[in-house]
Image (cartoon, rainbow, N blue to C red):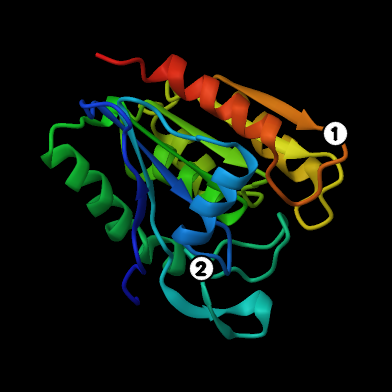
Amino acid sequence: MAALGALHLTKNTGAKHTATVIFFHGSGASGDHMKEWVNLMAKNFSFPHIKILYPTAPLQPYTPAGGLMSNVWFDRVDIDKKAPEIIKSLNSIEGDIKMLIKKENEIGISNNRIIVGGFSMGGALALHTAYRWESNLAGVFAFSSFLNDNSSVYEELKKSNKNVSVPLLQIHGNADDLVDISWGQATFNELKALGVQGEFYVMERLGHSINKRGLHIIKDWIEKLLPDV
């Protein structure tokens, strides 16, 4: 597995750093691109006490792009919720994500002060992180994302309910022509059936993208879950 790319961040604007958000980009993008996009759509997407990390996925062959090299968190058989997960590829990124979180732990930020989230594939990665690989995270958000049918996330939650208490926020455009909103809704419904509590917001006339309203919803949600201490 190739190494993670460049790590970009938005520093906490106040003097004290007491919480962290890790924001994963979608396929073919980068941490720098995600940071710029977020700040373009929602001015001043920052917090006095919260640092935001924007990591970059490894450069690796991506099957849906004809095997071309791309910055992706994991490979897919196809962009289709009916396609099987490539478990080996998914699990190969686990150690890198855990290391990001461990580094925050080492500077005094415990898991219950960390939120993970992302756009598209980044949102799927966040769901695997919150409900499979880590424990006791403060929350997880996914914008225009989905999990495959019979996802290993569902299987993990069926085996152990230790992470069902991690709050979920999903946002999806009803004009998304790459990841149909029904895929996102099905993901939310399945997680809810397994005990996860969360919210699902529909963005009218939004395609496969983020928008100002959705980011403001995420920001308000983060502030509720990670108040200053």
Which image quadrant: the N terminus? bottom left
Is 90 in front, or is 99?
99
Instruction: Name the residue: 21% across, 41% down.
Output: 104
| Amino acid at circle 1 | Glu
Q: Position of residue 50 (x, y in %)?
A: 33, 30
Circle 2/circle 1 CB separation < 8 Å: no
| Label 2 secondary element | loop
Q: Position of residue 8 (x, y in %)?
A: 36, 56
Instruction: Name the residue: 47% across, 79% down.
Output: 60
Instruction: Name the residue: 61% across, 25% down.
Output: 217
Answer whether residue 190 is visible to the viewer in this image: no
Q: Position of residue 198 (x, y in %)?
A: 58, 21
Which image quadrant: the C terminus? top left
**Left-right relation of 134 to 28:** left
Q: Quadrant of residue 132?
A: top left
Mark 2 or 1: the one toward you: 1
| Label 1 secondary element | loop
Is 79 in front, or is 3?
3
Q: Is residue 229 above or below residue 87?
A: above
| Amino acid at circle 2 | Val
Q: Quadrant of residue 67?
A: bottom right
Q: Which mark is residue 204?
A: 1
Q: Which mark is residue 192?
A: none
Q: Earlier in the sequence, mark 2 or mark 1?
A: 2
Instruction: Name the residue: 17% across, 38% down.
Output: 105
Q: Position of residue 78 (x, y in %)?
A: 69, 69
How much space separates mark 2 and mark 1, taking CA atoms?
28 Å
For disc 2, the marked residue is: 72
